[in-house]
Image (tube, rainbow, N blue to C red):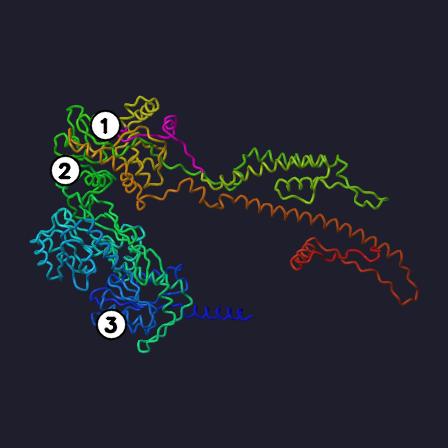
Amino acid sequence: MMSYLTRILLSLNLFTYISSNSEIKIGALFPTISKQRSDPEVAFQYAVHRVNNDKSLLPDLKLIHNIQYIGKDSFQTVQKVCNLIEYGVQALFSPTDSLLATHINSICDDLDIPDIGIGRSAQEFSINVHPSQQYINQAFIDVIRYLNWTRFGILYEKDHGILILNEFSRSIQAELHIRQVSSGSYLTVLNEFKSNEIHNILIDTNSAGISILLKNILQQQMNEYKFHYFFTSFDLENFDLEDFKYNFVNITSFRLVDMGDVAVKEILKDIEYHNRRLLNHNESTYKSRKAVSIETEAALMFDAVYVFAIGLQSIYPLLKLPNLTCDDEVPWNGGLSLINYINAVEWKGLTGPIQFKEGQRIQFKLDLIKLKQHSIVKVGEWTPHNHLNITEPSLFFDAGSMNVTLVVITILETPYVMMRYGKNYTGNERFYGFCVDILEHISHEVGFDYILDLVPDRKYGAKDPETGQWNGMVAQLMKYKADLAVGSMTITYARESVIDFTKPFMNLGISILFKVPTAEPTRLFSFMNPLAIEIWIYVLVAYILVSLTIYLLAKLSPIEWRSIHPCDIDHLTISNQFTISDSFWFTIGTLMQQGSDIYPRATSTRIISSIWGFFSLIIVASYTANLAAFLTVERMINPIENADDLASQTEISYGTLESGSTMTFFRDSMIETYKKMWRVMDNKKPMAFTSTYEDGIRRVNQGNYAFLMESTMLDYIVQRDCNLTQIGGLLDTKGYGIATPKGSPWRDKISLAILELQEKGDIQMLYDKWWKNTDETCKRITSNKQSKANALGLDSIGGVFVVLLTGILVAFIVSFLEFIINFRQQAKLMRINQNSCKNSNHLNYTPVKGSQTTTHLAYLSPPRSLWVEMFEELRFAFWCTNKRQRPELNSSCAQCQK
């Protein structure tokens, strides 16, 4: 009994906590900025907004944040912290300033309020989302050991460095030149390092001063390939490194936020949109900004809010509101429990995997990035468990091979080579696409730099049949005006005779582009599709035949006849349960697998019943097996399946690009099917041919036209237009290769690089990037997914409801007819009984003269109409729905009932 009361009290207390804790107050301290909000503040507000909208995380809670702005004055900072505590905050998010964080942490530690920090230096009793300094130190030590730096310099700023220099210097066996710097002394120290030929420099400074440092490096002309700068800042990708991209200078750093991660990109877009909405920025201002990115401190602040929310989710609603002040110094009852739950959080945020031990973050992933021509690339990663893993070692030790610069010509064709417009791009940065990415990989593997430009006449290269002269990229290579030609250039016999080709980096062929076949229209009575119409007729005939057979066999078999009153020997009456209606009812019950209260007794009727049951089993099983496929799988009307079907019909026109290699293939082919197709196309000139791919695609979309084109371009189009599809396989095989002049020493090297890229799957990944980019491709539902995901609509099984409603209507009509027939029979019987009663009373009536008595005749109720009787029946049905009996209406006299 006591334990039961205890559970009730705990439930009441729990309800009290839930009611009182619907709002959770949190506080945050940010440095004062005159112009606008800092990025960590924006991330903090967005994280609170996102947590409040995430009903799966804290469904019954709402975070209320209070932001205070602080400067360098520690006394003022302590006052604002005390104000937040009196306000009732249940957690405090402290700034990155280590001196101020110490004062804040001491107050939070005395009152047991969670202090969640994002600074580099960890406090003893706080929870720090920033990776532990011990692990950060080890990560930089591992990289320097890998690079085998035996002599290097270190630039650091007081109170801003991320490294523990004492431990760092003791762990490195090298000649170190450590210099403390500020924004005004960068140039002097760099000049000293340059004079002493110190080419490897570790820069451990404030991120705010890196832009000034980069300008000073350019002023000292220390942006050559022999210099290597290793930054401790995690925000290298946010700085302008345009002037460092083309001099082969080595710039390396770690990053904590993987900007390439899809989930991170989505969050960054939401943060940008949220901030823009708060600041009321217009759309043009938003579009003109650079690519969406985030500073590491802002990402850490976002993760800090989520870490608190996840920890709060585990302990809520057993958490009481704090009522604390700095003057009382009374710890918060429940604060230690909340801190312990936050310490137990394991989550993956913007800064990667998160896990704590005694308030220090021990689980994270650092991406090692390095500046390469045109971009910053990931070359490895570091984790506390696996330590350093270099994935691109050649980017560190293959700098000497970057002295050769090749002239590469190309031609614009989507998606192989495309040009950026709208901004003043220069050099190789103007071009992008599938072939440009392949060229970048090959230049890295083989070891050369390149200058990419367009061929002057914008042609691939063809031989003039009159003059015998070549044009396009082939002519440029023949005249040795270019070293390489890259693009969707087909390897042919004619071209191979005057220039060289590498191994093909892409194989393709001719295929058929056609409009996606239309789905078969859904009929109202689609549930009847599993069986053909003649089968339904046969089943109906079989039903009637079996019902009549059972009726006849039951009449013929003496076993089916039974005495109604076997004890009444004087009046023996026998009956048969299989009347004509009951026979049909028994048969339909068996077919519907519902059974009935009638069962056969004779051997003959049991035989026919068993055979009918077996027949019903097969029919029902076959119908059920086909029903799901007919109702859920969308059936397509596809008039052609391959080139043979296309050649053997006349309703659908077909053609190809005029004066292209595809047209040449059909014209010169010796295969009978293709010769037949060429004759049809040749007879329909010029309607069968198109001048551009776009014209052919437009005609395919209009319907009744098939376009013959190269499979790679066809696949690219199909991925972006779900109304189009590929019919059949490839009609021939060919390949794209990189062209070189005759006898070029680069052909074999590039061929080996292409084979290596194919074996590693790099070319396939690039193909998926440009052909199957989810941002550009349409959402195509495959047939397998259709069979699992399609929901049945009213247009598919609406006929079942029609049958149901029809059955209800017929049942009402039959019931009405039964009522009419019964009413007329009862009315006829009532008239007979009334006449009988009248005659009887008339015969027995003898009046006595002078008598005062009167003989009373039995009262006969007047006959009622059909509608009155029906109304009485309906009224009884509605009023006495739970009764199974009702009194019978008195329709005869007492004399007749004797």
Q: State whether residue 623 is above or below residue 190.
A: above
Query: Mark 1 is on which residue type?
Result: Thr
| Label annotation for residue 421 | none
Quadrant location of residue 429?
top left
Pick the quarter of the image with the C terminus.
bottom right
The structure residue drawn at horizontal position 92% and vertical position 67%, both measured from the top left corner, is: 850
Residue at the spot of label 2: 406
Please name the residue that numbered disc 3 is placed on: 77
Q: Please state which amino acid type lies under the numbered disc 3.
A: Thr
Which circle's residue, 1 or 3, is located before the other in the chain? Answer: 3
**Is disc 2 in contact with disc 1, using a CB cutoff of under 8 Å?**
no
Q: Position of residue 470 (x, y in %)?
A: 16, 28
Percent across and percent down for residue 579 are 72, 40
Which element is circle 2 on? strand
Q: Is residue 646 magenta?
A: yes
Q: Earlier in the sequence, mark 2 or mark 1?
A: 2
For discs 2 and 1, the disc positioned in front in the rendered view: 2
Q: CA distance from mark 2 to mark 3?
A: 61 Å
What amino acid is found at the position of numbered circle 2 in the picture? Leu
Q: Mark 1 sits on what residue?
A: 492
As drawn, 344 above or below 404 = below
Out of 403 and 560, give the one closest to the viewer.
403
